[in-house]
Each structure stands twice: as structure tokens, then as C-alpha cells.
């Protein structure tokens, strides 16, 4: 089905040592996000006198893909870290924490297409769990083109044969787009169709994020 999401499961508060954490399974993806902060940024010359720095560090485990991935940062993970950091900076009330850093580590344990969307969705949940003040959660989902069809949330096989991929991060409660990248080519009509699918999907995923947060805090309250 072109408008179908892969199965998604989310849990918040899964890591004892972090200030906030989230674990998301989405299709074949398994992603852990842990958040720390706000805490004083070191080295001091990196501090901003008026606001916090939000740093998202995306990493794919060596065992996360079929062929062993060479451990450590590469151009792709640096790019994903950068776009996710920028997306999260838009929602965190950074002015409340001058000179501070807020760090989110996104660890991809198993990868199966769309990890940046899963990672960003998990990262915003981990920040919320850490009690970081934000104007909303970031919810991300991709759509792409397989043959001449626009398809939501491409699986690994679809992605391999896909002609385009459009990952988008949205702050659902304000409608702001905080991440948008495009691989390949979409016509204006195809782009609009893809954005329509992503809009509907992110609303559903947002409800799951809220439910995951409520689930943890209801348990704590009981
Ligand atoms: O994961 P995402 O779609 O956000 O990023 P991508 O760069 O478009 O990668 C697509 C997929 O290729 C990933 O989700 C992985 O399943 C796979 N991949 C891989 O097998 N080995 C890598 N070194 C990088 C990605």
C-alpha cells in the first residue's frame, strides 16, 4: 500500500544513566536515543553566551547492517548528525540555557531504511523525557518514488529500487518543517503527493510519541 507505515513501537525511559531516553522499532529499524543536559559546555570557547548548543550525534553500529559497517564517523553520519542537530535546535527553547550543551546520542542498532527519520523521532522523545523545554516534538517520516508511484515510508527493498527519497521532519503541533532532504527527483505533483502522505503519517506517529511519553509518566505516577 503506497500510504502504509511500517509497524512502529516506541518506549521512553529505557536507559538508567541518561537524563532521558527512547527506544524505537520501526520496520526493520531498531534505534536507541539518549539525551543529556542541559550541562555546561566544554571546551568553554564553544559556549554561546545567550543560548544552548543542541548536539545530536548519529551513529550506526558496525553490526547494524548486513555487511559489517566500518565503525566510527563517516561523511554520511556527520551529515545526518548535522541535519538532526539543526532540526532539534528549532524546537528546544535554547535561550533558556546560555553557555550550555544539550546532547542526544542516536545509536542505530539495526538499520533497514529511513534511519534518519527514526533517529530524529527517537531523539525528540529522549529530549522530552529529559524534561528539556521544547515548543513541540519533532516527528519525521519519509516518502519516495518507486517506479512511477509515490510511496510512503520506503522499506529496504523499496529504497534499493527507489528513484527518490524525501525525508521530512515536522513539528506537528505548529506545522513547521524542520528537516527536509531530497535524494533523486520528484515532479511538483509527486512532491505534493509525497508531502500529503508525510503529513498524514507524521500525525499518526506524533500520537504514538505522546502515548509513549504518557505511558512512562502514568507508570511513575502510580
Ligand atoms: O537510513 P536513511 O534512509 O535515513 O539514510 P540513507 O543514507 O538513505 O540509507 C538508506 C539505508 O541504507 C539505511 O537505512 C541502511 O539500511 C542502508 N545502509 C547500509 O546498509 N549501510 C550503510 N553504510 C549505510 C546505509
Image (cartoon, grey):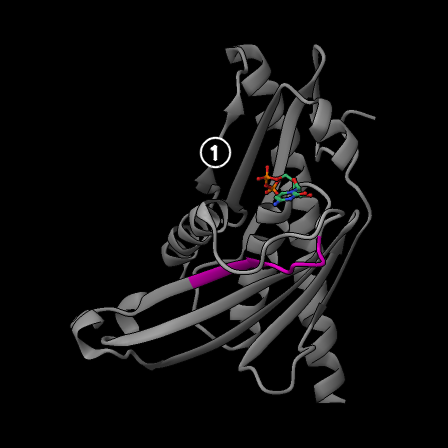
The structure residue drawn at horizontal position 63% and vertical position 48%, both measured from the top left corner, is 115
Q: Quadrant of residue 5?
A: top right
| Quadrant that contains the C terminus | bottom right
| Quadrant that contains the N terminus | top right
The structure residue drawn at horizontal position 37% and vertical position 64%, both measured from the top left corner, is 54
Q: Where residue 152 sits in the image (x, y, percent)?
A: 70, 30
| Ligand 1 located in image quadrant | top right
The structure residue drawn at horizontal position 57% and vertical position 59%, both measured from the top left corner, is 71
Helix or strand or loop: what does disc 1 sit on? loop
Q: Is residue 97 visible?
A: no
Q: Quadrant of residue 147?
A: top right
Q: Quadrant of residue 197?
A: top right
Q: Which residues are magenta?
A: 56-64
Kindly identify which residue carries mark 1. 181
Q: Where residue 65 sits in the image (x, y, percent)?
A: 72, 50
Q: Is residue 127 visible?
A: yes
Amino acid at each position: 500500500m503506497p500510504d502504509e507505515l511500517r509497524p512502529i513501537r516506541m518506549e521512553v525511559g529505557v536507559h538508567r544513566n541518561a537524563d532521558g531516553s527512547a527506544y524505537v522499532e520501526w520496520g526493520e529499524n531498531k534505534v536507541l536515543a539518549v539525551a543529556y543536559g542541559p550541562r555546561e559546555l566544554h571546551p568553554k570557547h564553544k559556549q554561546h553566551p545567550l543560548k544552548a548548543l543542541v548536539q545530536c550525534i548519529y551513529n550506526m553500529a558496525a553490526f547494524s547492517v548486513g555487511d559489517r559497517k566500518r565503525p566510527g564517523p563517516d561523511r554520511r553520519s556527520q551529515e545526518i548528525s548535522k541535519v538532526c542537530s539543526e532540526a532539534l535546535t528549532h524546537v528546544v527553547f535554547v535561550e533558556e540555557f546560555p553557555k550550555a550543551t544539550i546532547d542526544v546520542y542516536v545509536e542505530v542498532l539495526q538499520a533497514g531504511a529511513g534511519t534518519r527519520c527514526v533517529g530524529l523521532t527517537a531523539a525528540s522523545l529522549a529530549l522530552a523525557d529529559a524534561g528539556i523545554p521544547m515548543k513541540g516534538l519533532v516527528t519525521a517520516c519519509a516518502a519516495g518514488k518507486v517506479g512511477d508511484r509515490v510511496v510512503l515510508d520506503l522499506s529496504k527493498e523499496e529504497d534499493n529500487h527507489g528513484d527518490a527519497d524525501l525525508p521530512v521532519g515536522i513539528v506537528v503541533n505548529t506545522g513547521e518543517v524542520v528537516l527536509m532532504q531530497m535524494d533523486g527527483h520528484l515532479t511538483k505533483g509527486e512532491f505534493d503527493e509525497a508531502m500529503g502522505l508525510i503529513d498524514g503519517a507524521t500525525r499518526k506517529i506524533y500520537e504514538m510519541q505522546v502515548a509513549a511519553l504518557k505511558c512512562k509518566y502514568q507508570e511513575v505516577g502510580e
